[in-house]
Image (cartoon, rainbow, N blue to C red):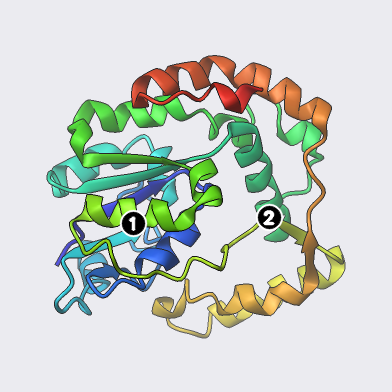
Amino acid sequence: MLPNFLIIGAAKSGTTSLYHYLRQHPGVYMSPLKEPQYFCGEGERAVPTRDAYQRLFDGVTIQKAIGEASPQYLNSPSASGRIADDLPDVKLIVSLRNPADRAYSYYLGRIRGGHERASVIDAMQPGAFYFQTSLYHPGLSRYFDRFDKSRIKVILFDDLSADAGAVVRDLYRFLGVDDSFATDVSVRHNVGTVPRSIGLNRTLLAARRVVRTLVPRTFAGTGFAARAQQPLLRPAEPLPSSLRRQLLDRFSDDVARTSALIGRDLSHWLA
């Protein structure tokens, strides 16, 4: 069994919430591991083999829409080709967010995960990881070049934040399942937070790495570690306005090209 739809990104654009919302529907099956990353390049995959990937969908019974969510696919140079080869009729869901806000949210996530120590100013420079992965047009173009537009559903994080229920119902229609199902969209998942104490956070992360060596890989992605970390976190400060303005000016060309590609006005991102 292989999926017939994928949530391919962008990271920090509501993909975790979409994963949890869609999996509530009785006609939708979502991989129990949220981010298999199977179609990414070698060395980047949580699930490296086809057999292991197919086993993620062993639980499918009557569900019509079968999917997984790996936001790394959008920026992976090889994922679009591998997906086109293995799943030529797949449907693709993409969620896009204001690129400056997405870059900052990604930065906060890596601070929270203990992977980043650079200042926000240094981390947001053109050419740096957070900036480059917020350039949407290169990644989207790879998919629009390989898949018919009717198979690609692009949503905006703005719309998901404003009316998640309406967005999810639209996705149900896209996936061909009953759009009258009442989905609980009251919880926003994976929101931007930072550690209250860097020291305590590092201790918890070190303990989590030990635990991961002792439990099966299939237990990864269940959300237990994230729940354990939650009491140590606090809401993040907003991105400094002057830096945000600089970033938006630098993103303006990519925003214009992305807008033309997907057929949606994104000028409000640059305001």
Residue sitting farthest toward the bottom: 214
* Residue at x 26% of width, y 65% of height: 53
User: What's the mark number on residue 169?
Assistant: 1
* Residue at x 82% of width, y 35% of height: 240
SS of the residue at dot 2? loop
Dot 2 or dot 1, earlier in sequence: 1
- Can residue 218 be seen in this snapshot? yes
Q: Nearer the viewer, residue 45 or 8?
A: 8
Q: Nearer the viewer, residue 179 or 111?
A: 179
Cβ–Cβ under 8 Å for marks 2 and 1: no
Q: Using the image, determine if residue 2 lies above or below residue 13.
A: below
Quarter of the figure that contains the N terminus: bottom left
Q: Amino acid at mark 1?
A: Arg
Q: Looking at the picture, how far across and down is residue 165, in whole percent?
A: 43, 58
Report the number of numbered marks: 2
Q: Using the image, determine if residue 171 lies above or below residue 141.
A: below
* Residue at x 49% of width, y 44% of height: 159
The residue where tag 2 is placed is 192
- Can residue 43 be seen in this snapshot? no
User: What's the mark number on residue 53?
Assistant: none
Please give left or right for residue 207 compared with residue 59 in the image.
right
Q: Residues within 10 Å of mark 2 (few under 14, many from 20)?
A: some
Q: Nearer the viewer, residue 262 or 72?
A: 262
Please give left or right for residue 154 compared with residue 172 in the image.
right
Q: Looking at the picture, how far across and down is residue 203, in whole percent?
A: 78, 74
Q: Looking at the picture, how far across and down is residue 22, in whole percent?
A: 36, 64
Q: Using the image, determine if residue 222 lies above or below residue 46.
A: below
Q: Looking at the picture, how far across and down is residue 89, in whole percent?
A: 12, 46
The image quadrant that residue 208 belongs to is: bottom right
Q: Amino acid at mark 2?
A: Gly
